[in-house]
Amino acid sequence: MAYSNFQHSIILLLLLFILPTFSQQSFRPKALVLPVTKDGETTLQYTTQINQRTPLVPLNLVVDLGGQFLWVDCQNKYTSSTYRPARCGSAQCSLAKAKDCGDCFSSPKPGCNNNTCGLLADNTVTHTVTSGELAEDVLSIQSTNGFNPGQTVSVSHFLFSCAPTILLRGLASGASGMAGLGRTKIALPSQLASAFSFARKFAICVSSSSGAVIFGDGPYGFLPNIVLDSNSLTYTPLLINPASTASAFSQEEASSEYFIGVKAIKIDEKVVSVNTSLLSRDSNGVGGTKISTVDPYTVLEASIYKAVTEAFVKASIARNITRVASFAPFEFCFSSDSVGGTRLGAAVPTIELFLQNENTVWRIFGANSMVNINDEVLCLGFVKGGQYLMTSIVLGGYQLEDNLVQFDLAASRLGFSSLLFGRQTGCFNFNFTSNA
Ligand SMILES: *[C@@H]1O[C@H](CO)[C@@H](O)[C@H](O)[C@H]1NC(C)=O
Ligand SMILES: *[C@@H]1O[C@H](CO)[C@@H](O)[C@H](O)[C@H]1NC(C)=O
Ligand SMILES: *[C@@H]1O[C@H](CO)[C@@H](O)[C@H](O)[C@H]1NC(C)=O
Ligand SMILES: *[C@@H]1O[C@H](CO)[C@@H](O)[C@H](O)[C@H]1NC(C)=O
């Protein structure tokens, strides 16, 4: 009797180990989808939900477009039978470029093991960094055909960094870490692409309410029956910034963030006069334009901010728009009564970012430039950065809303749709009803 029970447990154990790999092989997703929600009341951060560990635990994570990897709080209630720390000198440590090797002088638990390599987990909201153990665990995520979420799939050895609870300060309430979508080999896009052998491409589509991150190739479908593919996007090269922009880093690291080349700015078709050397990056990686989901509004270097806002106010006056008192954090506000409405938002001057040539233009219309303060006031949603800012233009979350932006890492190019309101849809229109 005892013997046969023993046999049963062996078979059960075998099944437990074999089944997950088996189910993964029998269905290979072409793309994956994560839902995104904006914490619109307080932090203005974009959060997503991912299931991790064994048994699976749903985690709320702040989406960090340029973030280096996934980091989660391991100090508070991390229990998982599949947690594995990365041992010093292992392939995992070298993939993650984790050079430090450390011991932990406490009882072993997730985040505290001997002979493990560590990574600096970066809270890019507060610019706080702590050292965290590199580890792997199961990650589970929904597949997609581009139109709906489908069958759930899992990655059994997903690499991430284990952070202490204190690093969560400044994140949206309920968040237990950050999901880094940056250019590194262990950020979500590359790990997911290599786990399922699909294209190293992903797209983000955020809005003031809900949105999606889609890993893998398009097409991308939005209600009511709007399908976006590569023909619907305008492409510009993604630029590699050889200098790290992380809060703390070792000398030779390149930035994990996404940079594009803005060559000129026009407002209502007039060129804004800015110091063009600030638009390109110098040899120290200073200057240039990056895209961020962590900055809620576009941040402009002080002299660019001055030139852009002056030109915007001038063009607004030419349109008979009335300026009113400022409303922190915004300096330039207008009376709603004096502004008409269009399908693309408030009828204000159009801000154009000229990229690699005259025909490649990122246009910012009213829906992305103006923030409604109340029924009477709307403000230009740009904020002033310091002088000698590391990056001259940081295109922030509000300016990305309802624009589909695709990051093609293999081809090193970025595709953008322009404001989807022009196509009678928006990022909140991804159909999250599963068809699995
Ligand atoms: C690591 O090794 C030290 C020294 O052998 C030991 O005191 C400590 O308890 C160990 N820590 C863990 C987490 O195993
Ligand atoms: C333009 O910016 C560069 C880099 O910060 C600076 O060295 C230069 O003096 C600026 N030029 C003008 C005309 O302000
Ligand atoms: C602005 O107002 C003036 C005076 O009322 C009018 O002549 C002009 O056409 C208006 N301009 C626009 C762009 O509406
Ligand atoms: C969303 O997708 C589901 C599943 O395919 C479908 O049944 C439903 O009609 C879709 N919703 C809309 C509003 O089209």
Image (tube, helix red, strand yellow):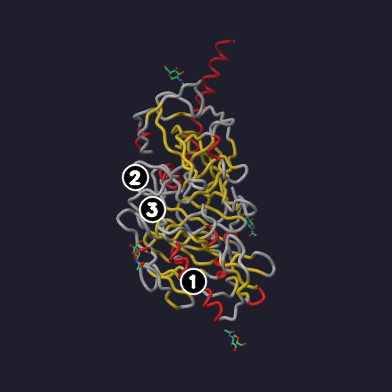
Relative side of 80 to 372, left or right: left
Residue 296 coordinates in the image, percent (x, y):
54, 56
> Residue at 46% across / 78% down in the picture?
269
Q: Label 1: state its secondary structure.
A: strand
Q: Residue placed at 60% from the left, 72% from the top?
A: 346
- Look at label 3 and name its amino acid: Leu
Q: Which callout, 2 or 3, points at the residue further toward the start of the chain?
A: 2
Q: From this view, report whether residue 118 is shown above or below residue 105.
A: below
State which tag comes first along the sequence, 3 or 1.
1
The residue that disc 3 covers is 409
Residue at image x 49%, y 73%? 310
Up the image or down, 124 lies above or below 320; here it is above
Can you tell which of label 3 and label 1 is closer to the viewer? 1
Label pair 3/1, CB-CB below 8 angstroms: no
Question: Is residue 405 in view?
Answer: no
Q: Is mark 2 on a helix, strand or loop?
A: loop
- In 3D space, how far apart are the residues under numbered discs 2 and 3 (Cα atoms)? 18 Å
Query: Badge 2 local density, few (<14 within 10 Å), some, or many (20+)?
Result: some
Q: In which quarter of the image is the N terminus?
A: top right
Q: Position of residue 416 (x, y in %)?
A: 46, 63
The residue wearing badge 1 is 351
- The alpha-carbon separation of the residues under discs 2 and 1 comes to 34 Å
| Residue 7 disc label | none
